[in-house]
Image (spheres, rainbow, N blue to C red):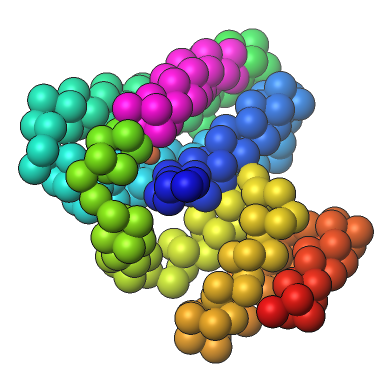
C-alpha cells in the first residue's frame, strides 16, 4: 500500500521555487536596477517561505519523530539550524547587493548573491530529500496514515491565509496535472468555500490555458467515474 507522504506536496512547491529562482538569477543583469530589485524580492520570498516551512516541521513534525527516535529528530533540528545560517548569509548578500552602487560593484554583489543562493539551494534540495528518505519511514513505522493527515491538518490550520496563498502558488507550479486535480477535488469537498475559490483562481492564474483545461477535465472525469 502506498503510504501518505506528508512532505510530497510542499516539497514539490519549494523545489519549484528553487529551480525557477535559480533560472531567474541566471537571467538577471545585476547592473539593471529594475531587474535586480525583482530578483532580490523573489529571493526574499524564498527565504521567507523556507523559514516558515522549517518552523512548521520543527513545531509539528519533528516532535512526532522525537517521541520514538530522539537522535534522528535532533539531527534534523541541527540541519534546520544550518539551513537558517545559510538563509542569513543569503540575506546579507541581498542587503549588500541592494546597497551596492556603480556597475562593477553591483555586478560583483550579484555574483555573491548567486553563490549564496546556490549554497542555500543545494543544502535544501539534499535536506528535503533526506527528510523524505529518513523521516518518512520512521513516521510510517510508528503512525497510521490518518494520524499523519492530522499532523498536516494542524500545520495547515496554523498558516494564515496570506501565507497559504504564497505557498499554494509554488505548489501549483510544482505539481503535475493529476495532483492539482486531486487537490482541487479535496478542497471542494473539505475546505471552506472562499478557500476553495482562492485555490481555484490561483490554479487558473499559475497554469497555462492548456494545462488548466487538462486539470478541469481530470476533475470532471473523476466526478463522472465516482
Ligand atoms: Fe521539509
Would you say the magenta stretch is mainly helix, strand or loop? helix
129 inside magenta stretch:
yes
Who's the residue at 66% across and 60% down the image?
180
User: Is residue 5 visible from the viewing direction of this image?
Assistant: yes
Who's the residue at 55% across and 59% down the image?
168
26 inside magenta stretch:
no
Q: Is residue 184 above or below residue 44?
A: below
Q: Residue furthest bottom?
A: 193
Q: Is residue 31 left or right of residue 2?
A: right
Q: Which residues are magenta?
A: 109-134
User: Quick one: 56 or 52, which is closer to the camera?
Assistant: 56
User: Is residue 49 visible from the viewing direction of this image?
Assistant: no
Q: Is residue 38 left or right of residue 69?
A: right
Q: Which quadrant is home to the C terminus?
A: bottom right
Q: Quadrant of ligand 1?
A: top left
* Residue 7, horizontal then vertical, whole percent: 43, 44
* Residue 218, horizontal then vertical, whole percent: 79, 66
Amino acid at each position: 500500500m502506498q503510504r501518505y507522504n506528508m512532505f510530497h506536496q510542499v516539497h514539490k512547491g519549494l523545489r519549484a521555487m528553487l529551480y525557477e529562482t535559480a533560472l531567474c538569477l541566471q537571467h538577471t543583469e545585476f547592473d539593471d536596477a529594475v531587474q535586480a530589485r525583482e530578483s532580490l524580492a523573489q529571493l526574499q520570498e524564498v527565504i521567507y517561505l523556507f523559514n516558515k516551512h522549517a518552523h512548521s516541521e520543527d513545531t509539528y513534525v519533528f516532535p512526532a519523530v522525537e517521541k520514538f527516535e530522539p537522535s534522528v529528530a535532533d539531527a534534523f533540528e541541527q540541519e534546520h539550524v544550518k539551513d537558517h545560517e545559510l538563509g542569513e548569509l543569503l540575506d546579507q548578500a541581498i542587503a549588500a547587493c541592494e546597497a551596492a552602487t556603480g556597475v562593477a560593484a553591483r555586478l560583483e554583489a550579484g555574483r555573491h548573491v548567486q553563490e549564496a543562493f546556490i549554497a542555500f539551494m543545494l543544502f535544501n534540495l539534499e535536506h528535503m530529500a533526506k527528510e523524505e528518505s529518513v523521516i518518512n519511514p520512521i513516521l510510517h513505522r510508528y503512525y497510521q496514515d490518518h494520524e499523519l493527515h492530522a499532523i498536516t491538518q494542524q500545520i495547515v490550520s496554523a498558516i494564515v491565509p496570506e501565507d497559504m496563498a504564497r505557498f499554494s502558488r509554488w505548489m501549483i507550479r510544482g505539481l503535475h496535472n493529476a495532483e492539482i486535480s486531486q487537490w482541487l477535488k479535496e478542497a471542494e469537498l473539505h475546505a471552506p468555500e472562499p478557500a476553495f475559490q482562492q485555490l481555484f483562481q490561483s490554479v487558473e492564474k499559475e497554469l497555462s490555458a492548456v494545462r488548466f483545461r487538462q486539470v478541469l477535465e481530470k476533475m470532471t472525469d473523476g466526478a463522472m467515474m465516482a
